[in-house]
Amino acid sequence: MFFKTMKISALLLFCFLIFFTSCSSYQKVLKGKETTSKYALADTLYKMGKYKKALKLMEQIVPAYRGKPQAERLMFIYANTFYNLEDFYLSGYQFERFEVSYPKSDSVEIAAYKSAKSYYQLSPKYSLDQEDTYKALEKLQGYINKYPNTIYRDEANILVAELRGKIELKDIEVAKQYLKIFDFKPAIEAFENFIADHPGSEFRIDAFYGRFEAGYRLALNGVPQLQQERLLTAKTYYNSFIKYYKDSEKMKDADVILDDINKRLNIEEPTS
């Protein structure tokens, strides 16, 4: 038992000495002035996945290597280190700088993709402001257009579809919220904007029906003198709705509203 304990203690001491020596060597290079040693150690640490330590060294030597043969690789792994550390603001920016600085590099395509994907990672949930989502869409679509035969095309298209779906959900929820709080004019405008902006969306049925309902409610709750005109406008919204969705589950509710509109306009429906 005594010898077993001694072996364990010796092993722990050995590991501690290796760790201490390693840390000591790292600190020596980090605090030194030799850029070649910093580059070599940064590259080694990067390959080992020790990105935080590698980054500290890179930040010291990036300015010194500008214009030198090693700069291309250094700038790529510098950007990729931010990416691996999930600092997507900086990775997006640094990959963009790499694209501009090394347009003929063998790594420029992957840099462009990772730049776009960095902005994708910054896209917030749909209920928040979508400025970063629009920027990510722009970057990804630009990447696809520039590299139509890229091996990342399918993945990029999936990301684009996801971002578009998020924006669509945001826009339809905003329109529905206007309707919910009885702000009918902005609701109609928001539904119409949705129809124009998102022609292939799964939420178009909600936009067509929502516009019809908002138009009907505006007529009932607005200025009496404008009620007839607004009821007639609501009927045009109904006609647009049934043009595309006459077999939908919302048709029953739409017909109930239409029946009330016709009664208020003193219009008799034709008997079958």
Image (cartoon, grey):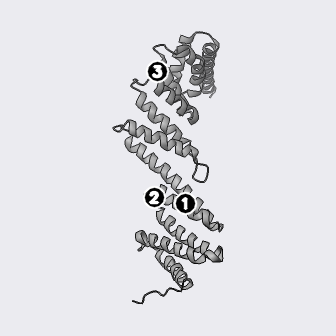
At label 2, the amino acid type is Ser
Residue for badge 1: 172
Q: CA distance from mark 2 to mark 1?
A: 10 Å
Which quadrant of the figure has residue 69?
A: top left
Left or right: 106 as drawn, with respect to 255: left
Task: Determine contact: label 2, label 1, CB under 8 Å.
Answer: yes
Q: Is residue 103 visible?
A: yes
- Can residue 176 be seen here? The reply is no
Q: CA distance from mark 2 to mark 3?
A: 43 Å
Q: Which residue is mark 2?
A: 201
The disc label shown at residue 73, or none: 3
Q: What amino acid is labelled 3 in the image?
A: Arg
> Circles 3 and 1: CB distance less than 8 Å?
no
Rendered image quadrant of residue 222 = bottom right
| Other-residue count near label 3 (Cα within 10 Å), few / some / many at <14 / 14–19 / ≥20 | few
Q: Earlier in the sequence, mark 3 or mark 1?
A: 3
Q: Is residue 84 above or below residue 237?
A: above
User: Residue 106: percent from the left, percent from the top?
Assistant: 38, 25
